[in-house]
């Protein structure tokens, strides 16, 4: 039911407000009081009131008549001849006006649908992923028909206007509700929303505009690519039906693991096994890197878990040209699980020299035989010195 409130007061704008201000006020209030959104009592009547005011103030001629003669100048009701939603034909047109869609009644014939996106799983070695490479890939996909050039029509013929939707690509169904007439818009089932049908389909593709064809492409793999990374090749997917745009091709990388190096983003890790003597005395050992083996110095007295960082020997950054991560060498001191008699004797002597109390494998002091042999060796040395 229309009220006698001033239309400017209803929208909350001053007289003389520009059209864009009136439109913004209407959008804000309509979204707030729409019956499908607002749960407040009287939202339906409030929405009708807002819509009525907007239909008058958004029309320059009717707004001028309202400014001069009030409601009498617009027939006493701003919604006269428009139904409860004014100039809108249904929710579709209403939300088009809210969000800048097509004008009411405009043709919405759909374009030919785009082709499907494709995925290709590409296997790479560790070295290829680190340094980058070019790969040739082959796959079978729907490509544009060469006979009809993708139109789907037999050469010499053309698609014609769809008789069911009259070329609009959509069907409108009007129904009456308590709020007035509502228009339900759906895509035409005969032409699939394209507005055209093919009377004489192409004999090669049978009207689809596409045929299966083996395709071969060359893919440039950037240095530093990792497991699961995707390379998008725009327009290299399946062709769209009846001349529609092609989809994209996504090449997904799968990288083989390195037998010795572990990778975390742009950083590489290597566990360097060394002996007790190498850790104590120091050594020069070879370490694998993406560029080949490199020798590193293990300092005397190196402790287990020590990290030796080789800067710039890691993985190249994908988005920072010329920069690379580091290679982290983690020292792993290996303790021998089995010793020869001579090795045990030497270690026992080392322990004695260091003042450590040693026990044998049976939990007792070192064997008496070992100690006896050392005493005999000492006596022989002293005898040799005395004789000489």
Image (tube, helix red, strand yellow):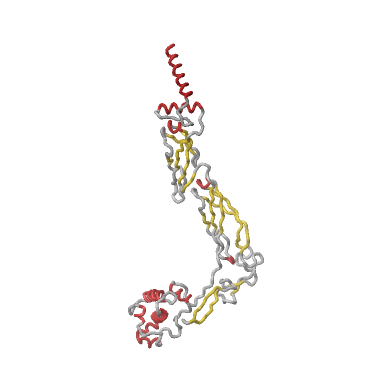
Residue at the extreme top: 387
* Of the pair 282 and 10, the residue shown nearer to us: 282
Q: In terms of image quadrants, where is residue 330?
A: top left
- Residue 358, position in %: x, y? 43, 30
**Number of marks:** 0
Quadrant including the C terminus: top left
Q: Residue at x 48, y 31 (%)?
A: 362
- Residue 218, position in %: x, y? 56, 52
Quadrant including the N terminus: bottom left
Q: Residue at x 58, y 73 (%)?
A: 189
Q: In the figure, 178 relative to 197: above or below? A: below
Q: In terms of image quadrants, where is residue 36?
A: bottom left
* Of the pair 81 and 308, the residue shown nearer to us: 308
* Of the pair 218 and 192, the residue shown nearer to us: 192
- Residue 38, position in %: x, y? 41, 75
- Residue 171, position in %: x, y? 55, 76
Residue at the extreme right: 203
Q: Which residue is drawn at 59% across and 75% down?
A: 162
* Of the pair 257 and 295, the residue shown nearer to us: 257
In the picture provided, is 222 more to the left or to the right than 303? right
């Amino acid at each position: 039911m229309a009220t006698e409130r001033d239309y400017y007061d209803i929208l909350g704008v001053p007289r003389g407000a520009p059209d864009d201000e009136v439109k913004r006020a209407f959008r804000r209030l309509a979204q707030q009081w729409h019956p499908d959104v607002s749960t407040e009592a009287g939202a339906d009547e409030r929405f009708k009131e807002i819509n009525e005011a907007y239909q008058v103030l958004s029309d320059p001629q009717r707004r001028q008549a309202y400014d001069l003669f009030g409601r009498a100048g617009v027939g006493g009701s701003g919604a006269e001849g428009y139904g409860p939603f004014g100039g809108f034909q249904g929710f579709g047109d209403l939300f088009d006006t809210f969000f800048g869609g097509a004008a009411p009644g405009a043709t919405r014939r759909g374009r030919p649908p785009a082709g499907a996106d494709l995925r290709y799983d590409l296997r790479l070695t560790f070295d290829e992923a680190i340094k980058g490479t070019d790969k040739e890939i082959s796959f079978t996909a729907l490509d544009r028909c060469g006979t009809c050039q993708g139109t789907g029509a037999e050469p010499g013929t053309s698609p014609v206007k769809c008789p069911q939707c009259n070329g609009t690509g959509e069907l409108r169904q009007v129904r009456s509700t308590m709020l007035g007439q509502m228009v339900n818009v759906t895509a035409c089932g005969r032409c699939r929303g394209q507005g055209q049908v093919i009377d004489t389909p192409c004999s090669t593709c049978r009207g689809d505009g596409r045929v299966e064809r083996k395709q071969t492409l060359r893919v440039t793999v950037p240095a530093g690519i990792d497991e699961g990374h995707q390379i998008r090749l725009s327009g290299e997917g399946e062709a769209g039906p009846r001349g529609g745009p092609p989809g994209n091709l996504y090449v997904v990388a799968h990288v083989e693991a390195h037998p010795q190096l572990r990778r975390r983003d742009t950083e590489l890790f290597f566990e360097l096994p060394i002996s007790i003597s190498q850790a104590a005395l120091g050594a020069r050992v070879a370490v694998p890197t993406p560029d080949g083996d490199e020798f590193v110095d293990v300092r005397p007295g190196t402790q287990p878990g020590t990290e030796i960082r080789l800067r710039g020997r890691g993985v190249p950054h994908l988005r920072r040209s010329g920069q690379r991560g580091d290679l982290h060498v983690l020292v792993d001191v290996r303790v021998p699980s089995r010793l020869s008699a001579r090795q045990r004797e030497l270690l026992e002597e080392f322990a004695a020299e260091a003042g450590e109390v040693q026990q044998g494998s049976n939990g007792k002091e070192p064997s008496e035989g070992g100690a006896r042999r050392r005493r005999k060796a000492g006596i022989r040395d002293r005898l040799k010195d005395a004789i000489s």
